[in-house]
Structures are given as structure tokens and as C-alpha cells.
Image: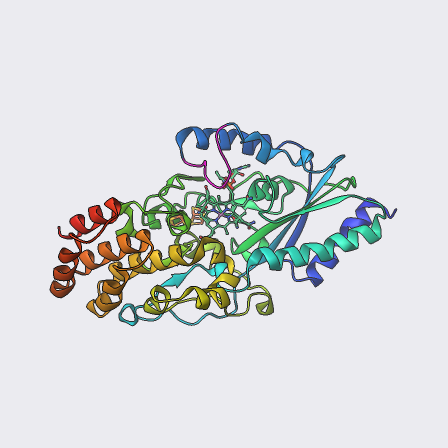
Amino acid sequence: MMDAVRIVAELRICASRAGLTGLAVGPARPLEEAARRLRERVAKGFAGHYGLTEGSEERFCRPDTLLPGAKSVICCALSYLRPSDPPAPPPESLCGVTARFARGRDYHLVMQEKLSVVEARLKELAPGCSTRVLCDTGPLMDRAAALASGLAWAGKNACVFTGEAGSWVVLGEIVTDVELPFDEPSPDHRCGSCELCLAACPTGAIVSPFEIDLNRCISHLTQMSGIIPRQLRPLMGTMIYGCDICQEVCPHNAAAVPGDPSDFEPGPVPAFPDLIWLLEMTQAEFETSLKRGSPGWIGRNRLRRNACVALGNIGDSSAVPALLKALHDPSSVVRAHAAWALGRIGDPKGLEILQKRLTREPDPDVLAEIRAAQG
Ligand code: B12
Ligand code: SF4
Ligand code: SF4
């Protein structure tokens, strides 16, 4: 087997050629600092979805258990920032906003492909070694692993920042039984006295530096199932999947270097989707478009629900006919949010028809929305 220092040097070259933005190696040891922070957050109710429940914190912070004989965690970052995106259309165009990480091909697939290239190179350099590739696909806190390896530093917005790409990166790892030299972890956060992201967050989800209450985070609200809490809907603006506000305002992202544009070519998810198109999308249309992008996993109806919220927040009565049609949708979640949007737009004709639905609507949650929409 080649000398371990040379292996890492070769892996860095390979990663860079594959279009990865950074590579660093950390030890496959328990992530104690992350486990402590995670326990605190789960106890406060600020985490606890996406498979993280009380008591499962440790499992997500144990890279040593992910592979028999695990020694090293090779952490990688991939920039999804495009050199240029179309400018945001004016509000009257009835368009929503997709967060940057979700605009191109599903990042899990792109990252997985690149990690496989690095994994194959490692297997050439250390024949017979064992590996496990992860990109949000196993019980591991990707950010914590990146921090422990020195690949990234933590921002007060809870995102991690890497080199020239800023925080516009997704993360992935290769856990291996090869003993590699470790990079230095980055202990500092480099935010100084800045708190721009805390001030900019529309919902106050950054409850204190480095601490997000996911129940208030717009990114979560656009992804969660069911009814979005009514009091938070007006704060969601026109986001239909994810939220970039706390990254957009960050000075460390001002001069971020974009990634390889071919990795995240425009589509299948438009940066600024037409909200009426989205609301009226059939299942067949969904299968051949949005389903193939990062937001695909939440399904068509959650995206249509988000379109209703965005239309309500724009407040333009040209959306009323489409929202009235959505009052008859088979999905009660879509009906509920369409009713809310009609109330928020406040168009007299829309409100009159909404009132008539009171006698026909079978679902109690939708009825509650219709009543609330009457003011
Ligand atoms: C659940 C989840 C979410 C939830 C909850 C996030 C949260 N902050 O609580 C929601 C839906 C809200 C979300 C939103 C986003 N997410 Co997300 N998410 C995840 C997921 C699947 C699990 C992570 C989790 O539950 N974390 C719980 C929180 C409490 O821990 P954490 O923030 O991940 O890690 C912290 C600890 O490690 C701790 N820590 C450990 N050691 C140390 C040391 C020091 C010194 C400090 C200060 C802190 C610290 O600090 C870390 C950073 O604050 C991961 C994938 C994965 N398997 O890790 C992606 C992941 C974290 N998300 C990612 C992305 C891209 C996003 C969004 C930017 C997407 C978007 N544009 O909408 C937003 C950012 C919102 C924000 N400001 O955090 C990336 C991270 C990219 C980055 N550069 O940081 C990940 C890693 C996916 C990936 N594989 O790339 N996400
Ligand atoms: S992603 Fe949006 S809602 Fe979530 S913490 Fe950042 S600014 Fe706030
Ligand atoms: S906006 Fe300021 S406080 Fe927030 S992550 Fe960036 S530098 Fe840190």
C-alpha cells in the first residue's frame, strides 16, 4: 500500500478533478461536541425530525460504528453555486423561489457520483480496503463530520463554510478502514461580532448563534408534511422549497466562487417557478419534471401547498381562479392552504365562493381554514 500521506495527496487531486470543492480527513471517532449540542437541541424541541429522535443522538455522531474497523472519515464538499442565475422576476409575475441547492439535478446523486470516483481511487491506492459512502444517506451528522475534519467552519446561521465556496456547498463522506493522516479541525467560527443572519431570518428561527429551531425554519416548513402553522405562513414569502436568506446575507458568501456549472445545470426545478403552473401540475407532469430534482421526495401535493402559500403572500387577485379550483382538490392539505390564500388575497368574489364551501367541505381542518379566512 502507498504511504498514507501520499494517498491523501492523490485523493485531493482526484477530488479536485472530479469537481469537488474540498476534501479533508478526520478521525472515525465519536463526535462528542456534536452529540452534546444535539442532545441540547432535541431536549429543547429544536431538532427531532428527519429520523433524529430523543435517544438517537449518539447514533448520528458515531462514525466509528458505520463500518467495521473504521479509522478515517474523508469529508468532501461540493459547490452548487452557479456562475449566473436568472434575476428574480418581479412579484406581479406570480413566481415562487426555489432554494439554490435544489435547482439543478438532485444533489445526492451528483455528490454520490463524485464520491464514487474518489472511493475508486482510494481502492486503487489501498487495495483491499473497506469503504462506505454517505451523503445524507446514513446516520451521520454531515456538518459535524466536516467540522471535525477541518473541511469547514461553523457559521452562526448553523451552516458550515468551506474555503472559497462559502456555505453554498453540500457535504458527503467516505468512511474507510485505512488509517490516513488527519487534517486539523477548525475550532473558530470566524463570524466575529456579525449577527446579520440572525437579524435577517424572517421567522426568528436562529434562536441564538449556531442554534436553529427547525420548527420555525422556512426550509423545514416547505418540506414538512401536512398543514403549515398558520401564523408562520405570512413569513414564508414566496419560497416553494428551502430557504437561502441566512446565507444570502452572509458577508463570507459575498465573493464565493461558483462550482462547475455542468454539475447543476438549470432544471428540472426552475429557480423561479410559475406558481399557477405549479399549483395546477398533474401527477404525470410532476413525474417528468420536479420529481427528478432534490424537492421530488416531498411529492407533488406539498409543492402545490407551498404554491398556495406563496400566492397568498403575493396577494394578487389574478391567482383567485386557480385557487378557487384548488378548493375542490382531492388533497385536503391543498384545499386548506388554497382557502388560506384566498382569505389573504381578500378578493370579494373569492371570499364569496369560499363562504359557500362552508356547507360542502367535509374535512374539519379545511373548514377551520375557511372560517379563519373569513376573518
Ligand atoms: C434535518 C436537516 C435540516 C433541517 C434542520 C437543520 C437544523 N439546522 O437543525 C432543515 C430542514 C431545517 C434543514 C435546512 C437546511 N439544510 Co439541512 N439537513 C438536515 C440533515 C438531513 C440532518 C441534520 C440535522 O438534523 N441536524 C441537526 C442540527 C442540530 O445539527 P447540524 O446543524 O446538522 O450540525 C451542527 C452540529 O454538528 C454542531 N457542532 C458540532 N461540532 C461543533 C463545533 C463548533 C465549534 C460549533 C459552533 C458547532 C458544532 O454544529 C453544527 C453546525 O451548527 C442534514 C444531512 C445530515 N445527515 O447531516 C442536512 C444538511 C445539514 N442540510 C444542508 C443544507 C444545504 C440545508 C439548507 C441550506 C437548505 C436550504 N437552502 O433550505 C438549510 C439551512 C438551514 C440552516 N440555517 O441550518 C447541508 C449542509 C450544508 C452546509 N453548508 O451547512 C446538509 C449537511 C445536507 C448535505 N448532505 O449537504 N436541514
Ligand atoms: S433557512 Fe431561512 S428560515 Fe431557516 S434559519 Fe435560515 S433564514 Fe431562517
Ligand atoms: S451572516 Fe454573519 S453571523 Fe451569520 S454566518 Fe455569516 S458571518 Fe456569521
Which residue is at 61% across, 58% downward?
109
196 horizontally vs 16: left or right: left
- Residue 47 part of the magenta segment: yes
Q: Is residue 270 visible?
A: no
Q: Is residue 268 shown left or right of residue 326?
A: right
**Compared with residue 194, is residue 96 higher up or lower down, i.e. above or below?**
below
Taking the magenta stretch, the answer to whether it contains residue 113 is no
**In x, y percent, where is residue 23?**
67, 51
The coloring applied to the image is rainbow
Q: Is residue 316 left or right of residue 32?
A: left
Q: Report the number of numbered marks.
A: 0
Residue positioned most to the right: 1
Location of residue 114 (image quadrant): bottom right
Q: Residue at x 62, y 47 (%)?
A: 151
Q: Is residue 348 left or right of residue 76?
A: left
Is 58 in front, or is 336?
336
Residue at 16% from the left image edge and 63% from the top image edge: 350
The front one of 34 and 272 is 272
Q: Main secondary structure of the magenta part?
A: loop
Residue 314 lies, in percent from the top left, at 25, 63
Q: Judge whether 306 appears above or below 213 on screen.
A: below
Q: Tell me the magenta residue range.
A: 46-54
Observer able to see residue 297: yes
Q: Position of residue 368 (x, y in %)?
A: 20, 46
Residue placed at 51% from the left, 70% from the top? 266
Q: Position of residue 58 (x, y in %)?
A: 57, 30
